[in-house]
Image (cartoon, grey):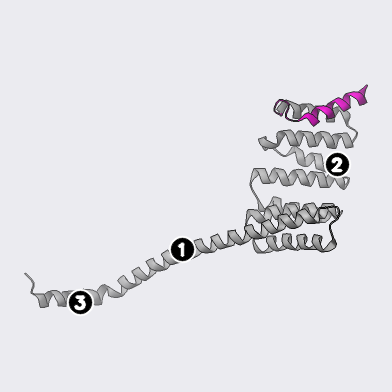
Amino acid sequence: MRTEEEQVEALKNWWKENGKSLVLTIALALAVVFGWKAWQNNQRVTAENAAAMYQNLVQAVSLASAPQATDAQRATAAHLAKTLKAEYGDTAYARFGALFSARLFVDAGDYPAALSELDWVLAQSDDSVMQAVASMRKARVMAAMGDLDKAVALLEGLKEPSFSVSVAELKGDLYLQMGEVDKARAAYQAAIADAPQGGRPLLSLKLESLAVKGS
């Protein structure tokens, strides 16, 4: 059995051989723990800041979209949307902000700028719902620019089930603008078939108006 002096000497020798690696291992473990906590805290702060800016943007867009809106209010909304996209571009808030920005550009009659914002959303998000929303808005902008054929072709590629009624209705609207009454009727009928019972009364009115036109 070792004496106390031998045990102490053995411990000293072990520490000489393994102490540095042990300290390094502990230091690395602590760095990982504190680094993870710092990353989580940074993510939380980023999300909170993005959310706060988004709330400000929602309020600014509400003011900027009013009939009595001033140039300063519109400029404020545009600035917030641009900043949100620049500083928090990888968040969902930035994509919603770009949708608001596109709306402001449409209100101002700047359709190319609106398309640019919507294309950015489509490039940034792989969420099918966001893709459907941005694509439908893009189709409306394209239609306003006179590109009705391209707008319909864009809608043809949308397969998100939760938007089947809205997509079919929009296609009917576009076909009607093109003077394609039969195609508009078929699109409205498809929309009504997918819609909840009594859920889209305006659709029935649109379809009935085509019956009047065809008589």
- Which residue sits at x=82%, y=64%? 72
**Residue carrying label 1:** 37
Q: Quadrant of residue 105?
A: bottom right
Instruction: Indicate which disc residue 13 carries.
Output: 3
Q: Quadrant of residue 108?
A: bottom right
Q: Is there a contact, CB below 8 Å, between mark 2 and mark 1? A: no
Say if residue 185 shows up in the picture: no
- From the top left corner, tell me how far across and down residue 162 is, in percent: 67, 36
- Amino acid type of the residue that numbered disc 3 sits on in the rendered structure: Asn
Say if residue 161 shows up in the picture: yes
**Residue carrying label 2:** 148
- Amino acid type of the residue that numbered disc 1 sits on in the rendered structure: Lys
Element type at mark 3? helix
- Which residue sits at x=30%, y=70%? 22
- Amino acid type of the residue that numbered disc 2 sits on in the rendered structure: Leu
- Which residue sits at x=38%, y=66%? 29
Highlighted range, magenta: 195-215
Find the distance from the CA under tag 2 to the CA under tag 3: 83 Å
Find the distance from the CA under tag 1 to the CA under tag 3: 36 Å
- From the top left corner, tell me how far across and down residue 21 is, in percent: 31, 72
Mark 2 or 1: in front is: 1
Does 189 appear above or below 113?
above
Is 104 covered by the magenta stretch?
no
